[in-house]
Structure formats: C-alpha cells, structure tokens
C-alpha cells in the first residue's frame, strides 16, 4: 500500500499527470490506506475509486469510513460486481447506498445473452457498466466478439459511458511472453469505440496488432469524434502507472 500511494502521488505530480485519474482501493483495505495516507501527508485529498469486495451490504460502512477522512480522501467512484441476475431491485439498492455525486460502476458477470441484458439494465439505471479485459486465467479474457457486442450495447444507449479493467497495461493487442495470454490493447479499445459510433469494422480494430496504424486512426479523429469516443470509453484501470504512458509516448499519442 505504501508503495502504491507514493507511486500515485508521484505520477499525479509529473508532467503526465493529465492521463492519471483515481486511486483504486478495495473496501477491505481502507484502514490500511488511511494509515499510510496519514504518514504520506498528501497536500490535498486523493481522488478515490472504492472497489467493493465486501458485498453490497458493506457499501454504507465503507463510504462512511471514506467520508470521515475527507482531509485524506475524496470519493469520486464506487465500483462493484453485480450478481448474475442483476435486476432493478439490486440496482436501486446501489443507488440508495452511493451518493448522487459519486459515479456508480457496476460489473455484470460476463457470458451469454444474460450478460448483455445485465449491461443494458446497468446502463438504463444510469450507472457505468464495467468490462473485465483480463486476469489470471483465460476465462478472464473476453473474446473479440464479446467485446464488440459489449461496445454495441453501450453505444446503442443515449449518453452511456463504460469503464474497462484488468489486462490493459499495454496500448496494442499482444501476447504476453510469460503467460502466453493474448491481451487486448487499450488503444485498440478506443479505436473500436470510435468505429462502433461510426458504424465501421469493430472486430478488425480489436484484433489489430499494428500500433502505427491504430495511432494514425486515433490522430485522424475529428475533435467531435474524439469527444464522443472519450464520452463512451471514459476510463480504464491498470496495474501499471508507467507502461501505458510509455506506450502512448512511443506511438506519438501524447
């Protein structure tokens, strides 16, 4: 935790601070986070995305803890997994627990048509759906078709926004030499979002491994198109603060 906090504060003070956003912390580790922040003495409260790993019933207590330390933490987002049968009743409880000025991010369990129905319900409820793009096993990696279907559902709703998480440390689709897993790239995802909005080939964008071609397509977006893409694909979580920035610099996108 100490290393993560110091790395985050350092990144937020760097010349690339504009690409960084919230510090993510599981609810179960809040006491540890607060203890380390007291030692670190940040000059202003850290923007926090609270990741609920204690069940929906644990949300009020976790939020209360965060709000009691407003000199250290500013709650901006709450993220949580949804049950397989995510419904209006469950989503209403989320709304009751999370303050109106805090972004709600809900991750429906991926797989089958029920998953996409859950994504639709999350969007209709006014929360951001979250899509997991990687993890410790092959099952954690969505297929190209699943990602394309997810983008289609979210883009089909008015003013909808999503967040992506896990496995997106690098800009371009690649095979990890250690695990052998094929990882999606976050620039691939941005280009795929742009193509979803414009009605072009989404699957080709997701499978592309030509970083220069992807970068050219990004740089060719009009200001209006770029704003629409970032409105749709607003955020992704990464376990690395530095690899995404290094990739963007290499591609000439910063």
Image (cartoon, helix red, strand yellow):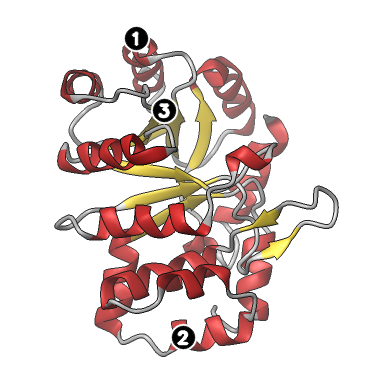
- Identified at 14% across, 57% down, the residue is 158
- Identified at 16% across, 24% down, the residue is 88
Residue identified by numbered label 2: 217
Which dot, 3 or 1, sits closer to the camera?
3
Look at the picture and state if 47 lies above or below 183: above
- Identified at 36% across, 26% down, the residue is 82
Q: Position of residue 125 (x, y in %)?
A: 16, 36
Quadrant where the N terminus sits is: top right
Local crowd at mark 3 within 10 Å, few (<14), some, or many (≥20)? some
**Depth check: 36 or 192 in front?**
192
Pointer 2 with pointer 1, Cβ within 8 A = no
What is the distance, in whole Å, between disc 3 and disc 1 at their CAs?
Answer: 13 Å
- Left or right placement of residue 233 versus residue 215 in this view: left
Look at the picture and state if 241 lies above or below 246: above
Quadrant where the C terminus sits is: bottom right
Among the two numbered marks 3 and 1 on one chain, the one whose residue lies closer to the N terminus: 1
Local crowd at mark 2 within 10 Å, few (<14), some, or many (≥20)? few
Look at the picture and state if 245 lies above or below 250: above
Q: Position of residue 15 (x, y in %)?
A: 58, 68
Pointer 3 with pointer 1, Cβ within 8 A = no
**Depth check: 92 or 7 in front?**
92
Among the two numbered marks 3 and 2 on one chain, the one whose residue lies closer to the N terminus: 3
What is the distance, in whole Å, between disc 3 and disc 2 at their CAs?
Answer: 33 Å
Residue 35: name its quadrant: top right
Residue identified by numbered label 3: 81
Residue identified by numbered label 1: 57
Disc ID at residue 46: none
Local crowd at mark 1 within 10 Å, few (<14), some, or many (≥20)? few
What is the distance, in whole Å, between disc 2 and disc 1 at their CAs?
Answer: 44 Å
Which SS class for mark 3? strand
């Amino acid at each position: 935790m100490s290393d993560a906090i110091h790395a985050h504060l350092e990144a937020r003070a760097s010349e690339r601070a504009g690409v960084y956003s919230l510090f993510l912390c599981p609810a179960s580790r809040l006491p540890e986070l607060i203890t380390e922040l007291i030692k670190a003495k940040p000059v202003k409260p850290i923007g926090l995305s609270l990741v609920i790993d204690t069940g929906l019933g644990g949300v009020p207590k976790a939020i209360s803890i965060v709000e009691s330390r407003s000199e250290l933490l500013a709650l901006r987002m709450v993220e949580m997994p949804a049950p397989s049968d995510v419904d209006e009743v469950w989503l209403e409880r989320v709304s009751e627990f999370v303050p109106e000025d805090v972004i709600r991010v809900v991750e429906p369990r991926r797989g089958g048509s029920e998953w996409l129905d859950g994504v639709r319900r999350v969007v209709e409820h006014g929360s951001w759906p979250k899509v997991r793009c990687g993890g410790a096993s092959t099952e954690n990696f969505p297929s190209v078709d699943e990602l394309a279907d997810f983008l289609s559902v979210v883009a089909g709703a008015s003013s909808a926004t999503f967040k992506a998480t896990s496995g997106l440390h690098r800009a371009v689709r690649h095979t990890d030499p250690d695990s052998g897993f094929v990882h999606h790239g976050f620039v691939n995802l941005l280009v795929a979002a742009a193509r979803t909005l414009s009605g072009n080939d989404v699957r080709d964008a997701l499978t592309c491994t030509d970083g220069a071609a992807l970068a050219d397509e990004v740089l060719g977006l009009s200001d209006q198109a770029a704003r629409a893409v970032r409105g749709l694909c607003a955020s992704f979580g990464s376990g690395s603060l530095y690899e995404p920035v290094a990739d963007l610099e290499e591609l000439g996108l910063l």
